[in-house]
Image: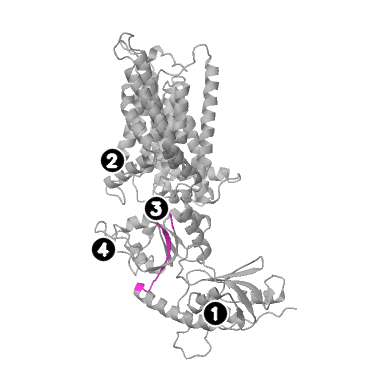
Amino acid sequence: MTALAPSPAHMRPGRAPSGPAPAGPAPGGSPRGTARRDLFLVLAVSAAAGVVSAIGLARAPARTSAEGALAASAYAVAQGDGLGPGRLDAPPLAALQVGGWEAIASALPGWDGALGAGREALLVLHVAAVALTVLLARRVGLPRVAALGAGLVLALSPLAVEESRRVTAAGAATPWMLVALVLAAGQTRLPLRLAASAAALAVAVLTAPVTVLAVPVAGWLAWRAAGPGRRHVLLVPTAVLLAAGGGYAAAARAYSLWPRGRQGWPWPAPGAEGLGAGRALDGVREWAAADPVLAVATAVAALLALRARDLRPLAVLLSVLLLVPFTTGAPPAHVVPALPVAAVLVTGVVVAEARRARQRPDHAAGRWLPALCVGFAACLAVLAAAVSWAPALRTLLDGDADAAYRSAAAWVLSDLPPDARVVTDEALLPELVAADRPGAVAGYADVDGSDRDARSWRGFDAVVVTPALRARLASAGPAGATGTVGTPVSAENAAADIGVLAAVRNSSLLAVFDSSDGPVEIRRIEASGSTAATDAQRADTAARVQAGSALAQNPRLDAPPAALRALAAGRVDSRVLTVLALALGEQRLRLAGFPSAPGEPATAPARSMTVTAVDGRQVAGQTPATRRLLDVLRAQPAPYSPRLDLAAGRLVVTFAAPSPLGLLPPPDDPTDEPDFGFSPATPTEDS
């Protein structure tokens, strides 16, 4: 499609236009027809973005601690429980927006779980951001083909797809920032348009304060749109912006709506935990590794766009959105608002250079050389994108980077007692909040390193060790020490997270789930200390060996050789041994084995047994023998009360983790018959 003709307002006295012409009706067309074609273009690109982002939404990318905290808070908002128990790093307005969508869409079919619901909300916002990117490209004068390209870059770039899926404040603020820029660049109904632009910009800044960098650029676009004779109308958006900011500040002071987390506004202060110059370089590396084509194209486009008058405001915005957060050590999510601006500039510079070459005199030497160079570079970029984006998108669409976190959360919910006090990373918080776990603790900072405080690490039952925690432990605790997770501890920030460090060092492994970033572990906290716990575990193993060996020789027990070897080796939980001995005193049992829960190490004692026959008859709920066994099992008090799953001719008896120590008598106890710690319940007589 040919470029649109420049309007007189676009011309500078004495020089030809250097950038894209302002959007307007094409020659021979009406404004209504142009708007209709633009709407069709927006809908088509938005649909493509929605499809790409929806596939595998809950599986990739792997969640982060900040995403988990925001998703949990949004879920609590949707349920009417305030901001939830987490330590929210983002402004609460982000949680209110995401939670509002979850409340509205709760009756519609969607993704299960708090994290999936949060990512669904960000999917809707990403689709809106793609549509607004196309409109912004048209607003700065790009033809439809270039605007389509900008939308496709944002819809298909692996970096954009990955970051748009995360539940972040920056992702929620990006559509509001784009609305403000689109409205500021318009030239009709200026007072109303600029007032709406200021309101949208206020929402963006209060959602993710990093978007405050767009305020001067929006003012720049509004100044141009107003022209010399109408710039007094800029007082309207200024008043709206000040009123919105002041009103929110007053409400935040009255209702505690400022962030409660460890990060500051609009980005973390230098020296904040895990951030700084090193974290900034890590962010650059992560961006370049996720999408090297877009990273290089963005750097080139940001420089070339400074030559084009209509693209210059966006080029300045892109530069500050990239440089300021990176130099202050902000997380990579802070660059999400820069992605749609980069998409517009990447396609815009190609149009600008082509127009610049066409406007040169015919006799000028090398008239088309710059345009040919830019066109050749654009073709190379398209080819490189096709080669590099395909495998990256396949990983995002088909991969499951979040499996370890989902499995760890499911294990905590299914295998730990409901009242267990768990020290957990915010990454697992969405599932725990959705399940209403009263014992879960949100955030490692809630644990105290002393023995006197009520929040002492000794008062908790388990700790979840994620790759993020290992990175934190690398800068916590005494200098030169090494934790049980195998991470060396430096002298920097030695006093930080001392409570969690003590809990991890005095813990034993319960379950582990592997991820691409490292294992996610659930560890049992040994309140008596690691040395005393090791001695107790050694004695408990010896007692299990003695009791299991006796049960393996019981003539009432029919079990495969592998199960008998597990009994004799002490690889069966003390509660399973106790209940099995009780049942064998009354009935004959046939076992299929002692299955281990997913993620549990092979050395951990099995907490389950599978019964396939009772008194020579296959397990079935209606048989008297099975009902008698079920009555005996249901009558047992804690800690011997199991979870019973009866289905398909099998009865699975499972006890909660962790396995208690000291339930069995020591091996040298002269007692002939062990005391199991309770009086066996009398089986119910069946008619």
- The location of residue 405, given as percent across then percent down, is 46, 55
The answer to whether 459 appears left or right of 435 in the picture is left
Kindly state the secondary structure of the residue where label 2 is placed: helix
Badge nearest the viewer, 4 or 3: 3
Which dot, 3 or 2, sits closer to the camera?
3
Tell me the SS state at disc 3.
loop
Give yes or no for residue 351 being in the magenta stretch: no
The reply to whether residue 77 is in sight is no
Left or right: residue 283 compared with residue 411: left
Q: In which quarter of the image is residue 173?
A: top left
Judge the density around disc 4: few (<14), some (14-19), many (≥20) Cα neighbours within 10 Å.
Answer: some
**Residue type at numbered disc 1:** Thr
In percent of the image, x 52 and y 69: which residue is there? 656
| Tag of residue 180 | none
In depth, the one of 129 and 160 nearer the eye is 160
Q: Return the disc, 4 or 1, that comes first in the chain's sequence.
A: 4
Q: Name the residue under label 4.
A: 478
The answer to whether 634 appears left or right of 145 in the picture is: right
Q: Distance between the residues labelled 3 and 2?
A: 25 Å
Kindly report which numbered mark, 2 or 1, lies closer to the viewer in this rendering.
1
- Specify the quadrant that holds the C terminus: bottom right
Query: Residues in magenta?
Result: 514-530
In whole angstroms, how far apart are the C-alphas of marks 4 and 2? 30 Å
Q: Mark 3 points at which residue?
A: 517
**Real-space CA distance between mark 4 and mark 1, rounded to the nearest whole angstrom:** 43 Å
Front residue of this view, candidates 194 and 162: 162
